Amino acid sequence: MAVTRQSIKSFHTNYAPAGASERELPAGFLRFFIPLHGKFAERHRALVLARRAALEESLRGNKPSHLPPSAATREWRVELPAWCEDQRNQMTGPADDAELVVKMLNSGAPGVMLDLEDSTVNEWEHQRLGVENILQALRGTLTYHDAKRDSVVGIKPGKTVIWIRPRGLHLHQGGVADGELCSASLFDVARIVFAVDPSQLKHPLAFYIPKSESAEEALFWRDMFQSLAQARGWPKDYIKCMALVESHPLAYQMEEFLYNLRDHILGLNLGRWDYMASLIHFNLDDPRWLLPDRNTIPHDVPFFQNLRELLPEICHKRGALAIGGMTALYPSRQDPELNARALAVLEKDKKNEANSLMDGAWTGHPDQNQIALEQFPAPNQLHARRAAANRYPDLRPVPTDVGKRTVE
């Protein structure tokens, strides 16, 4: 069945307005992109179906579990480049907000992730603007007008690593290939790759892979990165990445995921809130996994702490960075009491992540940067390994006496 705007009734699909793809995409982009879409479309569909099958299996009682030993558990290492050694804080925010992008890049954070996914609306104009801001940020030319000071503010020179988070494999882009849906992941990465000149960048292109659910999906990203590099005449391992662990099945396949992307990947990030949602999702058949308000769940709850300790063990064994998650409570410059509480929670949370041997974490506000930085040893903790670490811990201990369940 042909795909039309009328047949799309889901937030999973961003549909280009009529004529927008020809009018607003760079000249030559569709000739660059359509062959790639043809190459990867069937694999993308198969991975989406595999996700559904894995969830159905879990709800029938066949839960995700650790994989048996393989080539991924033998000897190999990731090569961490010097430009990425210090990622003690990665500030994140929506790419379609130029003012926020500039402020994040001027915050002094070692890393900044410009987001086309969770924090940016999956709608054509927001995504188009986000890509344009990213391209200008990569070149160092992005500015915004400061209304209070009536001045134009640009990006200050610095060593901040720019990461780009494209949309995940669960999302589609419509209105680009006639009558077909495209992988939003492929579309976003291709838009950036097509438009950049490596000679204008201070480090190789670096992406943040979201919402993965299996080590098999790492092969899709690997082949995508290498096909795009080949199309531009770059070395096949030019594009680098980190990846979020924010689905329950992937928690059991982290080492295999790293292995499949070992020529590109530099670290894993534990996306705690999405991970908790996925944990609930894969245990909907079990009433014991009805969790309370997330803000009443302690940061060291066993089902999370076990994973928080496993991720650095796997990453450091392989020479990759381990990055912690986002603290939910944001500071406020208008509310001194809330501000003090938010920063105290941040300090405690990031110290716990450092004690779990993470190399850094995420924040979402410039006021959080310095406190986050101070909790982690510089430049990283790659040398640190937990004595007698359990490589195959229980990642699904049933929560008991955790948080407070209320109608609200």
Image (cartoon, rainbow, N blue to C red):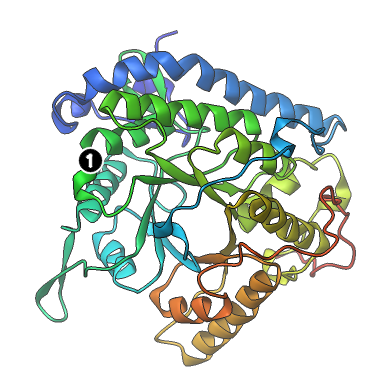
Measured as percent of width and height from the top left, residue 150 is found at: 9, 77
Q: Can you identify the residue that label 1 sits on?
A: 196
Measured as percent of width and height from the top left, residue 88 is found at: 50, 69
Mark 1 residue type: Val
Q: In what quadrant of the picture does the C terminus appear? A: bottom right
Identify the residue at horizontal 64%, vertical 75% (top origin): 349
334 with respect to 340 (left or right): left
Q: Quadrant of residue 77?
A: top right
Q: In what quadrant of the picture does the N terminus appear? A: top left
Identify the residue at horizontal 29%, vertical 36% (top origin): 193
Up the image or down, 305 lies above or below 218; here it is below
Q: Does residue 402 appear in this view?
A: yes
Measured as percent of width and height from the top left, residue 231 is found at: 29, 23
47 with respect to 278 (left or right): left
Identify the residue at horizontal 55%, vertical 38% (top origin): 262
Q: Which SS class for mark 1?
A: loop
Up the image or down, 242 lies above or below 83; here it is above
Crowding near pointer 1: few (<14 within 10 Å), some, many (20+)? some
Measured as percent of width and height from the top left, residue 225 is found at: 41, 31
Identify the residue at horizontal 36%, vertical 19% (top origin): 36
